[in-house]
Amino acid sequence: MPLPKRIPRSGSAKSKDASSVVTQRILANRYAVEKKLGSGNFGTVWMVKDSKAKDEKEKKKALKEIPVGDMQPDETLEASHEAKLLRNLDHPGIVKFYDSFIDGEFFCIVTEFCDGGDLGSKIVEYRERSQHLQEGQVLEWLIQLLLAVQYIHDRRVLHRDLKSNNIFLRNNMVKLGDFGISRILMGTSDMASTFVGTPYYMSPEVLKHEGYNSKSDVWSIGCILYELVTLDHAFQGQSLMGIMYKIVEGDLPPWPEEYSNDLGSVFTRICEKDPAKRASASEALKLPYISKQMEMLKNTMMGKHIAKAQRDTVNRESKQLATALKENQRIEEIRRESEEQKWKNLSPRERMRLRKQMEADMKAKRIEVEMQQQFLANKASYSENKQHQNPFETQLLNAHWAKSRSKSTGAPPAKGSASNRQHSQPDISRPMTAPLGGSYERHAADEESDEDSSDDDVIIPHRHTMHGYRDDRPITPMQNTMIYNPDRSSLDFKDGIPETPDLAETYYSQFEDDFEAEAEDDGEATLVAAEETEDLIHYMQTALNQADTTLRSSTMVADDSTLDAFGPSVRDIRIKNLRAEAGRKLGASQFEQVYQYLKRVRFPSVPSAASTLNEGEIMRGLRQIVNNPNDCFIVDQLLFLEAQADMSNKL
Ligand SMILES: Nc1ncnc2c1ncn2[C@@H]1O[C@H](COP(=O)(O)OP(=O)(O)OP(=O)(O)O)[C@@H](O)[C@H]1O
């Protein structure tokens, strides 16, 4: 959508180059427009720098400008109200909503900037490179999506427009974005959005006009899951109607054999045609395959997170040590300079004695430095080893996690976390210290819990690592099928995230290549990633702890309509209502023209040129009858229901 020319505002920043006076656009006195990210059906999105951001990591933001033309302020009230609701959503899997305001003829929405772009574009990239996504990666994103959807449903919020283009990536975490404000402003319904977009993600109940509910969001997640594994849409057809029929009447598409049947069953559960039988987001998270993978993902993330925190500490300490050494050196130089003066005045015997004494001092200093360096190296190797933990160590990790989290956030350890649980296994939460360069053994006395143990204490697993430490851990059997596919020249982890630590490491390193390189490697990105990882782990832990199997989200959501049996009488009433509504909207004569035109092109009695028109051509045809073809969608729905009624009457 072309952006109208803007008059530079007062306070606009100017380029330093006077020869090319470029005026930077600043909105709401704080958002400096940096670059265009793209345009969609409803407006244009810009990357902006927020001069009033609370901290560095929130400086970059995305600003969407939606033209509202001559709308009166009260007409944008609903959008402002929606914006207020969205501001309260705070979850690592949801694009943070910061601000909304009206600027001239635009309604502006300010959100978190996602450096990885949207998932739809990522899928297109993969398809164009003829690559596929690893099952582990698909699972990781699916779990993140389900957690985010569970979060909004618990807060009685429905997304209503979940599709891969509305899911964004930041630090390789997926985030739900683009909640329905644009559609509210445009006055378009859920159904009408198919006219400006696509019906690929719309659920059967929505297409059958039975009302949108929380399960409709879950259906869309199922369509996104299918898109992730096939890089194509789950339901396809030659025309809009064709796609709609596939969704409502057709079978689920075949599950690709490259991906596990376990994941295929998850797809079947979240893409049940009948919303009453379809799993809710929280039920999907409790499916055995998902919860097992979530537990592993959580542990791996926790291990990595803690290891990173410890590496940071080691780096900080190394820096402090280097500074202290430099300072020592400088003092030493000053001393030497003054000594040299004295030196000249000494007798040869006195000089000899002093030289010996200085050599002894230097040797002692060297040993001291080496010891400190050895200590830091041990700590670093401990951090590395922590990523290669066995299930027994998970308990320790949980305890360490809960402790470090409550320390850093002041929050109590998550309910059910290791530190809150009664230990049924031997407690390994007591860290062991080891003599420098010595071997590391666990003693009987160490089996007792010690809450006061210092974070600086070190445990070294019993395995011969690259640093030469002994490691007696049993090697766990390989539980993941690993397939090497020469065409793809990469490892396939068919069953998701491998359980064996070494494989898990290999598995993760693949994504590091793929995605971490894309993430900005600055302090800001790292900081955000660390905070979000913490939050995500917390949500995963909470989901895993939720023992209740009661239906929660699906019955709590505000506009969950009770799903009525879609019997003939209900359908007839709906048809009657739609007819009346369309007549009111279009006027009797235009309604008749549109109805006849759409009937001819959608359901030709004999194949004709009209039956091969694509959606763009149909839109052009409608424009010759009405000003706004969007108004005709209701007629499309009417025809769709009438055709359904016709079919069931013939049965
Ligand atoms: N928060 C964001 N961070 C980074 N990029 C974004 C953000 N929001 C949108 N974009 C990018 O801006 C472009 C336009 O997005 P927009 O949401 O307006 O359109 P769309 O999703 O393509 O279509 P639609 O209008 O149907 O939602 C897309 O390329 C999208 O990836």
Image (cartoon, rainbow, N blue to C red):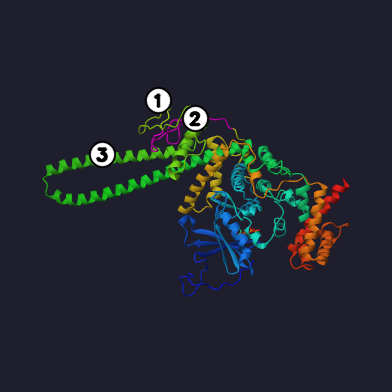
Which quadrant is home to the N terminus? bottom right
Q: State the residue in front, 187 or 21.
A: 187
Q: Mark 2 points at which residue?
A: 422
Residue 629 visible to an observer of this rendering: yes
The quarter of the picture where residue 2 lies is bottom right
Query: What residue is drawn where x is 77% and y is 48%?
Result: 248
Q: Does the residue labelled 3 lie within 8 Å of ligand 1?
A: no
In this rendering, which labeled residue sits more in front, label 1 or label 2?
Answer: 2
Q: Name the residue type under label 3.
A: Ala
Q: Mark 1 points at which residue?
A: 445
Q: Quadrant of ligand 1?
A: bottom right
**Residue 434, horizontal then vertical, whole percent:** 37, 32
Q: State the residue in front, 643 or 385.
A: 643
The quarter of the picture where residue 314 lies is top left
- Give the mark count: 3
What is the CA distance from the residue labelled 1 to the residue labelled 2? Answer: 19 Å
Disc assigned to residue 364: 3
Quick check: is 402 in the magenta stretch? Answer: no
What is the CA distance from the residue labelled 2 to the residue labelled 3? Answer: 49 Å
Residue 617 visible to an observer of this rendering: no
